[in-house]
Image (cartoon, rainbow, N blue to C red):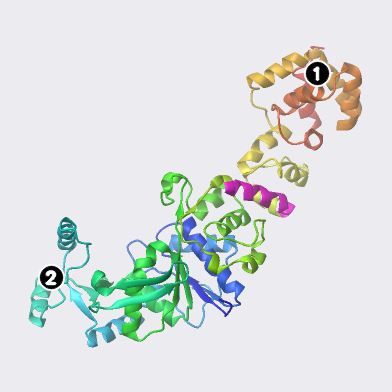
Amino acid sequence: MSSPAITRFAPSPTGSLHLGNARTAFFSHLWARKTAGRFILRIEDTDVERSQDRYRAELLDDLAWLGLDWDEGPDVGGPSAPYRQAERGEFYRSLFERLAREDRVYPCYCTAQELELSRKLQRMAGKPPRYAGTCRGLSVAQRAEREARGLTATLRFRVPEERVIEFTDLVHGPQRFLSDDIGDFIVRRENGSAAFFFCNAVDDSVMGVTHVLRGDDHLTNTPRQILVLEALGLRLMQYGHVGLLIGADGAPLSKRHGSTSVRDFRQRGFLPQALLNHLFHLGHTAETDGFLELARMPRYFRPDHLGRAPARFDEVQLVHWQKVSLARASTDCLRDWLGTAVTPPPGLDFDAFVELVRHNAVLPADAVPWAEAAWGRLAPLDAQTQQLVREAGPAFFSAALRAYDESAGDWKLMTASLRERTGRSGAALFMPLRAALTGQRHGPELAPLLKLMPAAVARARLQSHAESP
């Protein structure tokens, strides 16, 4: 595992980047960086009906946002270009012709309805559903007759009989499959495009990939792909199948659990460092439990510590990493992070506001109430906050207003003066002030918040609870 690893991430642009796929890309990236290897990005877009350019653009953008740069890919090129499978059709056709000459494949004219009926009958008989070989032995005449009826054919790989396919999975260990349990599978769709089993395997081989990491839902695909590569005389890769991401209920992570894509979390305001640190510990036992910058993660990544069991995604843990990331982030980073959620008035020291909310917000939306507290319009006080104000009384706020004016808004001088005027101290002094000035009972320190607050705003809030002049 110390030799240079050539890994890849090969997403299909049929939707947003799912967290499970992002974790696979992340682990593959770390393995390449750990061993001074190469990380390849390949777009698997042969499914023309579902693939969309906007999803491809999103995928590249979200991977770049995470910081997962690639050495070869559709936008940077490389020795194995093109890196979009939609542009590799001629290469696949040459391989199909070669397999056909060697009688390794055959056309299949079975309709979707016929295949579903066959699977149903097999299940009723207590057998695992697999292709029954209906078109495997058709003669030239029988094929011509079906084509004359306008039937279009897929191309199926002729799985050899009585074979044992064995390999050692990097996560699950030794694996053994019987070819008689697999059934002939489709390598070319009706529209002539290459199917996943085929193009995924041959591209990995010819692009020089040495290690393939993917979810363990692909484990049973591996013997099929090994058979294809052996039939073509192509080099095999080492495979590792990691446990899938699951929700709190133990089911595979899906939209019913809430956010499931990188874009979802990105739009909510989670930082890439937070997401990566959480993913780093999901299905991977690291040598450290502490926060790591992406540049340091390869050192602590252990491919042999990848887990077989499903990994439970926990947003509570993600929030923990978000707080750590915010505490460590630069002011420039946090200014960008707040984005359009908070718009300061002209002349405000926005960097001071950023530092104010650094430890008092998880997402940009959490900073909005503190922007309102600093310079905006307060929401009506809730019952407990109103009670605090009533108990302090109008005389207290009249004294607070005079202390504010005399101290020119200096928090230390203001509170010292108010203490002398009212005899209040501790929570009895600070809690009513916080309630009147911010409309809330808890939050950032009042001293820097008051410094940000325009004098007219602070005076108006104190005056609203003071005695009438």
Q: Quadrant of residue 379?
A: top right
Task: Name which residue type carries label 1.
Answer: Phe
Residue 150 tag number: 2
Q: Which residues are magenta?
A: 317-332
What secondary structure characterizes most of the magenta part?
helix
Task: Name which residue type carries label 2.
Answer: Gly
User: Does residue 229 appear to the left or right of 104 in the view shown?
Assistant: right
- Spatial distance from mark 1 to mark 2, Cα to Cα? 88 Å
Nearest the viewer among 120 and 79 is 120
Question: What element does badge 1 sit on?
Answer: helix
Residue beneath label 1, please?
Answer: 397
x, y percent for residue 250: 43, 48
Is residue 60 visible to the viewer in this orientation of the structure? yes
Q: Quadrant of residue 181?
A: bottom left
Magenta span includes 82:
no
Q: Quadrant of residue 38?
A: bottom right
x, y percent for residue 71: 56, 75
Quadrant the C terminus occupies: top right
